[in-house]
Amino acid sequence: MTQGAVPDPEDLIDGAGQIRMLLTIVSPVAMPGIIAATIFTFTVWLGAFLYPLVFIYSTDQLPLTAGIITTLIKGDVFQWAASWPSR
């Protein structure tokens, strides 16, 4: 069995099924791309969270992700009443 992107007919003759070929051929080839996409997604998410948290001081202008952290969570107590509509 060779490490390539195309499954070899020899793999089928040797008894490797579709799942085995996926795990031994496709996964090692795709893993660097999956890792790069994960790192890129994490850095974009972190930037979208930290920049508003650092640069915006008014809680009215914060996006939802940063606003929940700053207004609803104070220490270990969740301030759920602040998210309820007023009567």
Image: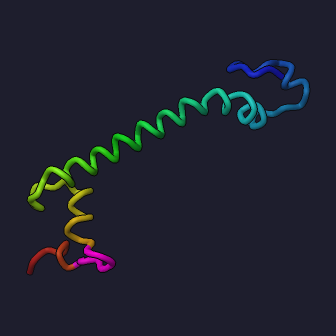
Residue 55 locus on image (x, y percent): 15, 50
Tell whether 3 sits left or right of 87: right
- Relative to residue 14, is residue 83 depicted above or below? below
Give the magenta part as a residue range.
74-80
Residue at 53% across, 36% down: 35
Question: Which residue in the rendered view is the most extreme toward the front?
Answer: 54
Residue 44 locus on image (x, y percent): 34, 40
Question: Which residue in the rendered view is the most extreme toward the right?
Answer: 14
- Relative to residue 87, is residue 54 depicted above or below? above
- Which of these two is toward me, 7 or 60? 60
Q: Please tell me in which quadrant of the rendered image residue 80 appears.
A: bottom left
- Which of these two is toward me, 74 or 21? 74
Residue at 46% across, 39% down: 39
Q: How is the image coloured?
A: rainbow
Residue at 33% across, 78% down: 76
- Which of these two is toward me, 25 or 48? 48
Instruction: Tell me how many marks there are.
Output: 0
- Which of these two is toward me, 84 or 61? 61
- Relative to residue 60, is residue 85 depicted above or below? below
The answer to whether residue 72 is magenta is: no
Residue 83 locus on image (x, y percent): 19, 72
The answer to whether residue 77 is magenta is: yes
Q: In which quarter of the image is the N terminus?
A: top right
Q: Please tell me in which quadrant of the rendered image residue 79 appears.
A: bottom left
Residue 47 locus on image (x, y percent): 29, 44
Q: Quadrant of the C terminus?
A: bottom left
